Image (tube, coloured by chain):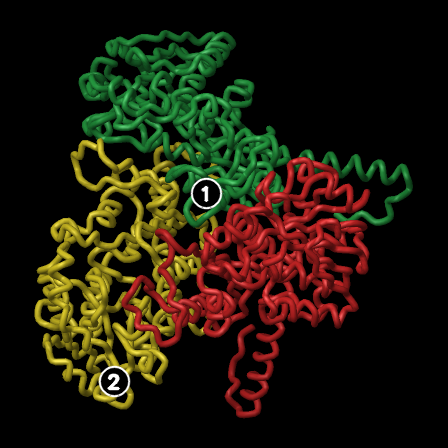
Chain colours: A red, B green, C yellow
Amino acid sequence: MNGLYHLGELPTQAVERLVQRALDFRRGVTPVKFPGRGLGLFFLSPSLRTQASFQRAAAKLGLDLVQLQGGGNGVWQLELTDGAVMNGGSVEHVREAAAVLGRFVDVLAIRAFSGGQDLALDLSDPIVNGFRRFAGVPIVNMESALWHPCQALADWATLDMLGVPKRAKFVLTWANHPKPLPHAVPNSTLAMALQRGMDVVLARPKGYDLHERAMAEAQRLAHESGGRLTVTDDRDAVEGAAVVYAKSWGSLAAWGDLAREQHLRAGLAHWCVDGDLMRRAGPNARFMHCLPVRRNVVVKDEVLDGPWSVVIDQAENRLHAQTALLERIFLDLEAQSKAKKSSLELSMKSSGELEEVRP
Amino acid sequence: MNGLYHLGELPTQAVERLVQRALDFRRGVTPVKFPGRGLGLFFLSPSLRTQASFQRAAAKLGLDLVQLQGGGNGVWQLELTDGAVMNGGSVEHVREAAAVLGRFVDVLAIRAFSGGQDLALDLSDPIVNGFRRFAGVPIVNMESALWHPCQALADWATLDMLGVPKRAKFVLTWANHPKPLPHAVPNSTLAMALQRGMDVVLARPKGYDLHERAMAEAQRLAHESGGRLTVTDDRDAVEGAAVVYAKSWGSLAAWGDLAREQHLRAGLAHWCVDGDLMRRAGPNARFMHCLPVRRNVVVKDEVLDGPWSVVIDQAENRLHAQTALLERIFLDLEAQSKAKKSSLELSMKSSGELEEVRP
Amino acid sequence: MNGLYHLGELPTQAVERLVQRALDFRRGVTPVKFPGRGLGLFFLSPSLRTQASFQRAAAKLGLDLVQLQGGGNGVWQLELTDGAVMNGGSVEHVREAAAVLGRFVDVLAIRAFSGGQDLALDLSDPIVNGFRRFAGVPIVNMESALWHPCQALADWATLDMLGVPKRAKFVLTWANHPKPLPHAVPNSTLAMALQRGMDVVLARPKGYDLHERAMAEAQRLAHESGGRLTVTDDRDAVEGAAVVYAKSWGSLAAWGDLAREQHLRAGLAHWCVDGDLMRRAGPNARFMHCLPVRRNVVVKDEVLDGPWSVVIDQAENRLHAQTALLERIFLDLEAQSKAKKSSLELSMKSSGELEEVRP
């Protein structure tokens, strides 16, 4: 596995093997150790779960950890545009930043949210894609403008752990929030549930569609898995849901226009998951959210503190999912180095150059 | 030991064992290693000694280290109030932050100073207590609004190292400072010296009392140890002191009211420890301070650079004290896991479920 | 080796041994490990390469790592002036910060750029020199106001790796930039190339001389090595150069005076390295820069993305050079501890105090 940008890139079987391994780790299985291998974590956006769980995963795998924080007194501001004349605020081009960090570690994990100002720029996912183009090592996406594959993998593991059937009903519901948030999580949640083959309902108010490219990718995955997608603005569509997954996101129509966004969501404060909604879903419905979550805006205390919520388990599974993912990536790297080394030895032997090969 | 919030929680014998162990480490004894165990450090307030010494202590104990920095581009802003409608600046409730981090590590250490605006809020010590309620793992207080137990433990170790007798005179003196500072250190210093059984003088100008709850706790500890507490506004009370411990703090009466605070301390610039004061204390008196210290405001250069000062030894003992504290906490955790495991095996054996138990 | 402030302090033979070792590491040789030894990294200025490469080097050497970030919510603001009355913004004097950190680790590495306001202060290199005076442990300069020895060491290794002859022509050219930058890199680059014995041309516009002290040090090294230095404002002096090394820096005459600086460089935008200049240098000329670099201001894309550029190799060599440097410093520390220990044992034996010496 050569890094991970979007979970849907992986064959479903590969995802299922990672989920299995993640749940093994949750039960106490010890991962493979990779002494002398290095992992870089580069955060250009804030993080609690992601930082903590990647740091711990690196330690569990015995990796050399390199961690950088962008912004403030941390790291130089990055330029993303090809051909830019860099006489403004950006101090370093992603071409150099990526290529250099790629020389210091074997795998790089990057977090860089969408800027929320320029939709076309955000749709190009410029930072994480810049690193993928220029780093020369596998890149793990710790949440980009468009995708959050580690969250999706952890969520899949959570669904399996809870015994939620593959064909069960999964409702992804938009929620109110004081700010327009990026689309990485809803894009990834929708794609994940459909790749898993679920009966997915996307419930959102008018004006809050996900981008057509993310929808097309979701449909492609549904087609492969036999999953089903319904889009509605009817919050009563939760009926019979095994899972209610809440998430807020901004309107594509109002991207970068805060006044319009506020106007659009003015009457939408009732898009908050409460006990009534969960009871309408059914007696065994689970409440999921990626966290951080705005209590009593996105979801009521009674839900988060009630029997429905599995959000802390979801978060714990970030650690196990990422440990499984990194273990796989480093195992594949080691296999590649071995293959390279023996083909090199073979060619040296045949050309008589091999004098002394130390282990 | 299930974490540490305030040193006075511990039986004096337990403190003395930790101090002994800390001084062993100072002499070069190697601590126990805990491979595969994880420690989280979460800083919501600035730090030099605490960060550095906890990082090094974690390495000495062979722990997996997870470190997070609040504020700026680091971690989400925390909400502390139960039932809050989170439509303002706070992005994550301490309930989730604590519960999630508690899933990633075995022990969490938190630093969160008082806000200095709302006295009732500060007296509830909301952040560290939030973590204690919701993390589900032992919490180590790296300085909260009210207490700084690691400083107190290091100071006790310093007193023992220097051979300062248990019954010696210990003067905690208020000092001038451009800002009103929190009470965690004076509260903890007073309590520590009294738990150690010392003859304690608290010298402060009128209007600079410590909170009655901290005073009551100090008296409780004095009662147990046979220590003695005198409160005075007479700076000449240093006579015969084995230790002069300087610290500035804000007035409870002016909490959150900077103008009133400035007015209160307008005539107090002479509350600065100088050579004369140390000479009045006596020929072998020691000068202590927790650092960072404002030179020539809190204490004159001649004292810090003179024969009296032991502030660098105090700081070094932070490392050894915290190593001893963490070693104890992780030893107790391991003992608990073993106990749980053997009672589980026992119950499995008796129910015939035990087939294969790997070490 | 007792730390490293400026590469020119080291005998050339010592530099050559470090370069050799760095290139061994680049070829995959494993460094010595120092379990139980501690390295502190303290960043008071931003960093990408330096942070990442020092973190990785520490891991490769098996060191306990302590890392602190100054500014923001990280570490207290430092006071540098002796005798200061600290009633302003500075919270801790470098005397205490250095002495305390020196108790927590065996070696400290510090990054602190020039402030760019007060030339006399910057010429005293106050922060790194403060740590050298007060820390009590070897200090590694990760870029101070005046010197960047790790960059110089990595650059020397890059020149050796590329087979650039000792006597080859090396052009250090000033370059345009939106901001006046510090002199640490040009000072160190000039000194390094001359210590290596090269035929050095310093090409800069009038008004952009380096400080006379840095020039004198460069001349001293040239004198020892047989290197040669020419200063010119003629950009055509690149002819026949094996290396064109670009770097921008501020005018000493305009230090702290942004308006004057902008005026001085108003007509200097053509001081940007382009393909024409590289072609004038010659068919095998290499382009070097320490990074981060402003594309199309300091150097054109065609150069950075063309056959001339070795900037990524330079950056990679930071890791290997620093690993070699730290390995040397810690080997010397271990030798000193052994020597101290056996002389102690000897003196105890002779005085009959030695009862039991554990290994």
Is residue A185 rendered to the left or right of residue B49? right
Q: Amino acid at mark 1?
A: Gly
Discs 1, 2: same chain: no
* Residue density around tag 2, few if under 14, some if 14–19, many if 20 or more, within 10 Å: many
- C118 w.r.t. B170: above or below: below
Q: In the displayed structure, does residue B354 sit left or right of residue B103?
A: right
Residue A221, by quadrant, is bottom right
Which image quarter is the N terminus of chain C in?
A: bottom left
Q: Residue furthest bottom?
A: A351
Work out whether residue B8 can be spotted.
Answer: yes
Of residues C162 and C121, the one nearer the viewer is C121
The kind of secondary structure element at disc 2 is helix
Q: Position of residue B58 (x, y in %)?
A: 50, 43
What amino acid is labelled 2 in the image?
Met
Residue A36, position as x, y percentages in the image:
52, 63
- What SS does tag 1 mark? loop
| Res A206 → quadrant | bottom right
Residue that numbered label 2 is attached to:
C278
Place of residue C136 in the rendered image (x, y in percent of width and height, measured from the top left): 29, 43
Q: Is residue A96 left or right of residue B266?
A: right
Q: Which residue is rendered at x = 65% and y = 38% of the image?
A: A300
Query: Which of the labelled discs sits on residue B70, or is there none?
Result: 1
Compared to residue A47, the image places residue B30 above or below, namely above
**What residue is shown at x 25% (from left), y 68% (from top)?**
C13
Q: Which residue occupies 37% across, 36% down?
A: C348
Nearest to viewer (mark 1 / mark 2): 1
Q: Chain of mark 2?
A: C
* Relative image position of residue C92 (x, y in whole percent): 28, 36
Relative to B235, does residue C159 appear above or below in the rendering? below
Dot 1 falls on which chain?
B
Depth check: give the residue in front, A253 or B182: A253
